[in-house]
Image (cartoon, helix red, strand yellow):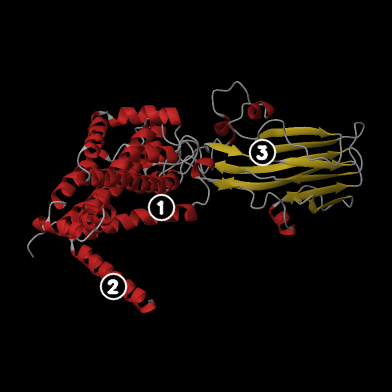
């Protein structure tokens, strides 16, 4: 029994190798397989190269242009991302090396170090006497134009020895050279043993931050006011002790989000468009393959039953098929998706259940022809039942049509999903190529060709790969279409 199983496995592997060799000898099939492997490789690499959903990550400034635009004259004022502080969490003593301190060397009453409190790293400043101290880092901003946005995420302070009568005054600042200082947050600390953060986000897009910095009512965005030119900038904080005390500061970082990023730039949320393009390949291939399997499977089942079972079964199945054929597929799909919800699985099921009718009629016509052939009559005479005849004799003679139509049904499913996503009925939790184009239309960015053309090329590329594979399979399985060598 074991040797028989092994021989069957070897036989099937040999048949598959011969079929693959025959496929690769066909130019259309070879090109189609190569294009499919490229698409599948992009889909498989997407979660490895970009582990997080790109739509949930602000990679650059809003509507950032591709990085390569900065090499052309129109990119003269573009800026790139900058991370000013390498270790904002102060998780190791080496984090202090990038910071400078004013007057600490002359004061024997001050110590500056790193400290971990409740698993939170911080820079700790201790003073045994009333004192004002500044901790700062100077960096160079090398771009002619301002960033699209800058943020100081999650800055928090914690004090010891502070009281209402002897507060510790903390002031966070960002200076441009020596001519302009912006106070981003100021706080009188009167309580101890609790981390305190600003009541407003330290984000240039927040309306509260310019007010806190003393910049309000201006015509320019806050980023242009602060980063108005190429210059040296200083990030830091000033602590004023009115009595002995200690202060801890954590998450002291500054991130500049530029208006030029990556190969394809960023969308209106600052998400990487190239990462979205790769993630969109996953959705398109998944929807195309699964929906096609559902549609072809239903069409095969209905066609086999209608072609072999004449009479009332054939009549009912074909009239139902005709009814489904006359219904407008896209409007019906729009209504059904709006009713059941724009889940990716709902979309797959609906596309599959609305895409089987044409294939069912093709299979029925083939079954009507095959069931009258002598070998079917011989099988009946030998006592074979309906199930045996359908699975062993008839299905094997229509399986080539199944392969061909399966390959040709994938592009239709991909285009249908893209159309639904473009119309705003796609799954909002799944990135698709249609959704990327829809997002561009929503913010009137259809003129940004690097935003809309790549997903369009992706849809055409994947669809063309399956079209080439489908036509080559038809050529291989149908002797009348084989070219003379």
Residue at (25%, 65%) from the top-left corner? 20
Report helix, strand or loop for mark 3: strand
Q: Nearer the viewer, mark 2 or mark 1?
A: 2
User: Depth check: 74 or 49 in front?
Assistant: 49
Q: Earlier in the sequence, mark 1 or mark 3?
A: 1
> In which quadrant of the rendered view does residue 444 lie?
top left
Question: Where is the C terminus found, in terms of image quarters?
Answer: bottom left
Q: Nearer the viewer, mark 1 or mark 3?
A: 1
Label 1 crowd bin: few (<14), some (14–19), many (20+), radius 10 Å: many
Rounded to the nearest angstrom, the CA distance separating label 3 from label 2 is 74 Å
Q: Nearer the viewer, mark 3 or mark 2?
A: 2
Residue at (12%, 55%) from the top-left corner? 373
Question: Where is the N terminus found, in terms of image quarters?
Answer: bottom left
User: Depth check: 419 or 87 in front?
Assistant: 419
User: Depth check: 122 or 421 in front?
Assistant: 421
Left or right: where 431 falls relative to 178: left
Rounded to the nearest angstrom, the CA distance separating label 2 from label 1 is 32 Å
The reply to whether the C-beta atoms of the residues labelled 3 and 2 are less than 8 Å apart is: no
Does residue 311 appear in the picture of this structure? yes
Q: Earlier in the sequence, mark 2 or mark 1?
A: 2
Residue 394 appears at what percent x and percent y? 21, 54
User: Looking at the image, is 219 positioned above or below residue 324?
Assistant: above
Report helix, strand or loop for mark 1: helix
Which residue matches tag 3? 174
Left or right: where 149 falls relative to 106: left
The reply to whether the C-beta atoms of the residues labelled 1 and 3 are less than 8 Å apart is: no
Residue 341 appears at what percent x and percent y? 46, 32
Residue at (31%, 55%) from the top-left corner? 36
Which residue matches tag 2? 11
Which residue matches tag 1? 43
Label 2 crowd bin: few (<14), some (14–19), many (20+), radius 10 Å: few
User: Looking at the image, is 7 positioned above or below residue 85?
Assistant: below
């Amino acid at each position: 029994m074991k040797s028989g199983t092994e021989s069957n496995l070897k036989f099937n592997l040999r048949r598959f190798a011969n079929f693959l060799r025959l496929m690769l000898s066909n130019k259309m099939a070879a090109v189609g397989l190569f294009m499919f492997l490229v698409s599948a490789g992009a889909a498989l690499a997407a979660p490895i190269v970009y582990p997080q959903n790109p739509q949930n990550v602000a990679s650059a400034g809003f509507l950032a242009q591709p990085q390569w635009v900065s090499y052309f004259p129109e990119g003269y004022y573009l800026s790139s991302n900058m991370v000013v502080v390498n270790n904002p969490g102060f998780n190791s003593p080496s984090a202090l090396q990038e910071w400078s301190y004013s007057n600490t060397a002359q004061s024997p009453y001050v110590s500056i170090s790193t400290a971990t409190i409740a698993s939170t790293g911080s820079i700790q400043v201790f003073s045994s006497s009333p004192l004002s101290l500044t901790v700062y880092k100077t960096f160079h901003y090398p771009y002619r134009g301002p960033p699209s946005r800058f943020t100081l995420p999650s800055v928090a302070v914690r004090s010891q020895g502070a009281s209402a009568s002897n507060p510790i005054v903390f002031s966070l600042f960002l200076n441009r050279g020596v001519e302009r200082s912006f106070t981003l947050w100021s706080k009188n600390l009167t309580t101890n043993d609790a981390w305190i953060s600003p009541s407003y986000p330290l984000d240039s897009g927040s309306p509260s931050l310019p007010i806190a910095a003393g910049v309000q009512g201006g015509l320019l965005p806050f980023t242009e006011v602060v980063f108005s030119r190429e210059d040296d900038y200083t990030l830091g904080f000033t602590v004023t002790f009115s009595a002995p005390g200690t202060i801890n500061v954590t998450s002291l970082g500054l991130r500049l989000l530029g208006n030029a990023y990556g190969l394809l730039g960023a969308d209106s949320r600052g998400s990487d468009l190239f990462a979205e393009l790769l993630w969109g390949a996953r959705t398109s291939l998944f929807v195309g393959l699964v929906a096609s399997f559902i549609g072809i499977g239903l069409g095969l089942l209905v066609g086999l039953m209608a072609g072999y079972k004449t009479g009332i079964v054939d009549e009912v199945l074909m009239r139902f098929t005709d009814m489904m054929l006359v219904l407008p597929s896209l409007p019906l799909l729009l209504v059904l998706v709006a009713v059941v919800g724009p889940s990716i699985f709902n979309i797959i099921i609906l596309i599959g259940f609305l895409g089987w009718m044409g294939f069912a009629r093709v299979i029925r016509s083939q079954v009507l022809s095959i069931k009258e052939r002598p070998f079917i009559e011989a099988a009946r005479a030998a006592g074979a039942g309906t199930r045996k005849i359908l699975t062993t004799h008839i299905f094997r003679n229509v399986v080539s049509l199944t392969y061909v139509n399966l390959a040709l049904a994938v592009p239709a499913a991909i285009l249908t999903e893209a159309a639904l996503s473009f119309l705003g009925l796609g799954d909002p939790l799944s990135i698709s190529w249609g959704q990327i184009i829809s997002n561009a239309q929503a913010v009137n960015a259809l003129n940004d060709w690097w935003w809309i053309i790549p997903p369009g090329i992706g849809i055409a590329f994947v669809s063309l790969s399956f079209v080439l594979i489908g036509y080559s399979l038809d050529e291989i399985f149908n002797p009348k279409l084989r070219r003379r060598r």
